[in-house]
Image (cartoon, helix red, strand yellow):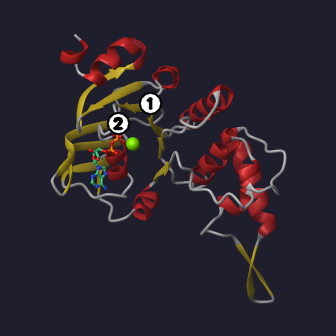
């Protein structure tokens, strides 16, 4: 992959008071790849992607998107730049139907006799279109509350919401399969492949090395706030990555 990295984070340090959550971390992600981030609890995975997605500001370090330096004061600024995230605790309103969730806070309107009204019909058709065109997913009903959907379908709605933004270039997923059964996990991994094939960079945080080895191109290993290595998935093994996660001295 001799191309410019889509995402480059260099020398990222993040301190919370006396706690150093990240210490001089570099991260690189390319368009059209799945980069997995793995590491034990507290290794700094979530903090790292929260820095990338503008939720936190780094104490030190620089970030680049397609070679241009970026710095975000808020998550909204990261979305504006083309970086969005789908979290394990999906930010879906359970009692609302999928179209309402797709456009939550971003509702489509039409003007009726000069008065702005919700354009429910277009939100419905757009939801149907994005789910099908971008993710190959067709829901049985768009009218049921989102809580009645399966875990995999809920993931699809959350991903559809992120990719609806035409400018989306980087999709971050923090433990997307943690609460899912095997079948729903397989479906979610397929969605990740679909999004990757559209040229996005997908950054996947996962505890499941099975998922990581099935779906990722490279693995970035965090340990105690530092990156302890990056491997090509096809040239590595769960044993090697596990050894890096726990630290060679403990593993020996
Ligand atoms: N908002 C915060 N305030 C203080 N400490 C935090 C905060 N967020 C994370 N940390 C600390 O930073 C370290 C890394 O946490 P985190 O990024 O959540 O790890 P991971 O996602 O790999 O489990 C942990 O020691 C955690 O306690
Ligand atoms: Mg975490």
What is the x, y in percent for residue 244? 28, 21
Query: Marks 2 and 1: CB-CB under 8 Å?
Result: no
Label 2, ligand 1: CB separation under 8 Å: yes
At x 23%, y 35%, the residue is: 224
Pointer 2: what residue? 41
Q: Residues within 10 Å of mark 2 (few under 14, many from 20)?
A: few
At x 45%, y 22%, the residue is: 209
At x 41%, y 19%, the residue is: 233
Q: Quadrant of the N terminus?
A: top left
Q: Inspect this view and state whether residue 158 appears.
A: yes
The tag earlier along the polypeptide, 2 or 1, is 2
C-alpha gap between disc 2 and disc 1: 9 Å
Label 1 residue SS? loop
What is the x, y in percent for residue 25? 22, 39
Q: Which mark is residue 175?
A: none
In this image, 209 relative to 152: left or right?
left
What is the x, y in percent for residue 219? 37, 26
In this image, 13 relative to 209: left or right?
left
State ligand 2's quadrant. top left
What is the x, y in percent for residue 106? 61, 68
Pointer 1: what residue? 207
Q: Is residue 89 above or below residue 54?
A: above
Label 2 residue SS? loop
Q: How many marks?
A: 2
Q: Which of the two residues, 196 or 252, is positioned nearer the viewer here?
A: 252
As drawn, the residue found furthest toward the top would be 252
Q: Is residue 114 above or below residue 208?
A: below
């Amino acid at each position: 992959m001799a191309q410019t990295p889509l995402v480059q984070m260099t020398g990222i340090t993040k301190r919370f008071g006396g706690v150093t959550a990240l210490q001089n971390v570099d991260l690189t992600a390319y368009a059209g790849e799945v980069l997995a981030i793995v590491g034990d609890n507290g290794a700094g995975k979530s903090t790292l992607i929260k820095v990338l997605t503008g939720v936190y500001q780094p104490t030190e370090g620089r970030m680049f998107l397609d070679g241009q330096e970026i710095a975000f004061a808020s998550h909204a600024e990261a979305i504006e730049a083309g970086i969005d995230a789908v979290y394990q605790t999906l930010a879906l309103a359970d009692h609302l139907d999928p179209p309402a969730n797709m456009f939550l806070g971003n509702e489509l309107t039409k003007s009726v006799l000069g008065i702005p009204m919700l354009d429910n019909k277009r939100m419905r058709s757009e939801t149907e279109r994005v789910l099908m065109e971008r993710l190959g997913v067709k829901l049985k009903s768009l009218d049921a509350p989102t809580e009645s959907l399966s875990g995999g379908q809920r993931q699809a709605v959350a991903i559809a919401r992120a990719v609806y933004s035409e400018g989306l270039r980087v999709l971050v997923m923090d433990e997307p399969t943690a609460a899912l059964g095997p079948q729903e996990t397989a479906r979610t991994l397929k969605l990740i492949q679909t999004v990757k094939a559209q040229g996005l960079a997908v950054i996947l945080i996962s505890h499941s090395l099975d998922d990581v080895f099935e779906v990722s191109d490279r693995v970035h290993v965090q340990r105690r706030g530092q990156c302890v290595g990056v491997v090509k998935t096809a040239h590595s093994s769960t044993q090697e990555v596990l050894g890096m996660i726990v630290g060679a001295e403990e593993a020996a």
